[in-house]
Amino acid sequence: MIAYHDEEWGRPSHNDRDLFELLSLETYQAGLSWEIVLKKRDAFRHAFFNFDIAKVAAMQSIEPLLLDSSIIRNRLKLAATVNNARAIVKIQQTYASFDNYVWHFVDGQTIDHHIENMADIPAQNQLSQIVAKRMKQDGFKFTGPVTIYSYLQAVGVINDHEVGCVFNPDQENGER
């Protein structure tokens, strides 16, 4: 958990594979702890071809995955991962990349909430509601506003590192 926070969470991501991986992991987190999901991350990478979007989109069956005890075996979430890969393939045709799609909601700029206290972080906001609604229209599954808020934090669209956190991008850039 500490390594994820220190090395990954909240850092702007612009790689379609990474964006897909984090979206997928966020969908598995719903109803579970993030720690459980992270412990199974390597197994998910193996099960989903290192989150290769084209390979996951081409999967014909999730049945073998339901027998894999190293991953979270929720049929609906597994099916959503394949479905979401297929949605991303369509998005890539329209936006040239999933990155362009994810970041177009904020004109390519991170939103910094200047968080003073972690208790002030909402579970969702207007942006996550807009993005979730659009993603649903674009065929994504398990992408409600709470999941999407967490996703936007994870990929750096929303910066919710506390102001004093040494991993806050503003701290790292010497802006504070």
Image (cartoon, rainbow, N blue to C red):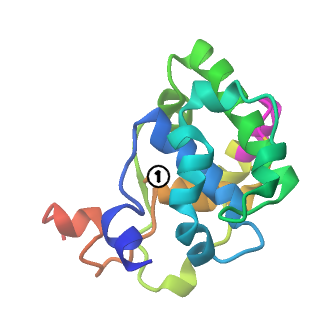
Check the image and report above or below for 37 versus 18: below
Position of the C terminus by quadrant: bottom left
Q: Is residue 92 left or right of residue 18?
A: right
- Which residue sits at x=41%, y=49%? 110
Looking at the image, residue 16 lies above or below residue 54: below
Whether the magenta-drawn stretch holds residue 120 is answered as: no
Give me the residue at 72% from left, 75% from top.
32
* Residue 84 % position (x, y): 71, 36
Tell me residue 95's x, y (percent): 55, 18
Q: Is residue 127 rendered to the left or right of residue 11? A: right
Q: Give the secondary structure at mark 1.
A: loop
Q: Quadrant of the N terminus?
A: bottom left
Image height of 107 relative to 4, above or below: above
Q: Position of residue 127 (x, y in %)?
A: 63, 51
Q: Main secondary structure of the magenta part?
A: helix
Instruction: Classify residue 123 by image quadrant.
Output: bottom right
Residue underneath mark 1: 155
Of 48 and 176, the residue lying toward us: 48
Percent of width and height locating residue 24: 64, 50
Mark 1 is surrounded, within 10 Å at the Cα level, by few (under 14), some (14 to 19) or many (20 or more) other residues, namely: many
View extreme (top): residue: 93
| Numbered marks: total | 1
Specify whether 102 is left or right of 30. left
Q: Residue at x 73, y 56 (%)?
A: 145
Can residue 139 be spotted in the picture?
yes
Q: Quadrant of residue 124?
A: bottom right
Kindly tell me whether residue 105 is visible in this rendering: no
Residue at x 54%, y 61% (from the top left corner): 41
Q: Give the extent of the magenta segment.
A: 132-140
Decide: is 165 above or below 101: below
For badge 1, the amino acid type reads Val
